[in-house]
Image (cartoon, rainbow, N blue to C red):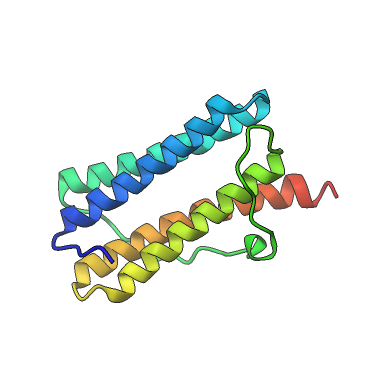
Amino acid sequence: MKQFKTIDDILDFAINAEQEAVDFYTGWAARSKNEQMKAVFLEFAGEEMKHKSRLSGIKENHSFEMPEEKVRDLKISDYLTDVVASSNMTYADALVLAMKKEKNAFRLYMMLSAVSDDPLMKALFLSLATEESKHKLRFEVEYDEYILREN
């Protein structure tokens, strides 16, 4: 496991992870033949860019707020099978893919928080995990409203 020595190490790691997500979604947008899917992937990429920007701001200003909040978990992704990304995937598949990616990011930050001895790093990891759980919830709500209710 990667060892972090400073808050900047954590932030660089998180910023890189957000950039990888941006690259993933923009790459799939470029490969998608369906205009609706292109728009969906570009929207996902935009969300990840916002997170990257927030993290860059935290790094630049050397401060962050960690509001006390609980994020609801609909657990929809727990009952869905994994989806392989493809250029002709459906909107439902794109949402499943996004939910799974956000869930994995959440788990990563929770694990890093659990193994961190530094209280500030622990708090930062928890904050990052909360952000990822918000994204997952957004995709779950979208899936519930537009996929499950239509069936």
**Camera-nearest residue between 86 and 38:** 86
On screen, residue 69 above or below 56: below
On screen, residue 54 above or below 87: below
Q: Is residue 69 left or right of residue 38?
A: left
Q: Is residue 151 left or right of residue 43?
A: right
Q: Position of residue 56 (x, y in %)?
A: 25, 42
The extreme right residue here reads 151
**Total number of numbered labels?**
0
**Camera-nearest residue between 130 and 68:** 130
Q: Residue at x 50, y 36 (%)?
A: 25
Quadrant of the snapshot with the N terminus: bottom left
Q: Quadrant of residue 50?
A: top left
On screen, residue 82 above or below 33: below
Q: Residue at x 44, y 65 (%)?
A: 107
Q: Position of residue 39 (x, y in %)?
A: 59, 28
Q: Residue at x 25, y 73 (%)?
A: 116
Q: Is residue 15 left or right of residue 82?
A: left
Q: Position of residue 113 (x, y in %)?
A: 31, 70
Q: Position of residue 122 (x, y in %)?
A: 27, 69
Q: Residue at x 56, y 55 (%)?
A: 100
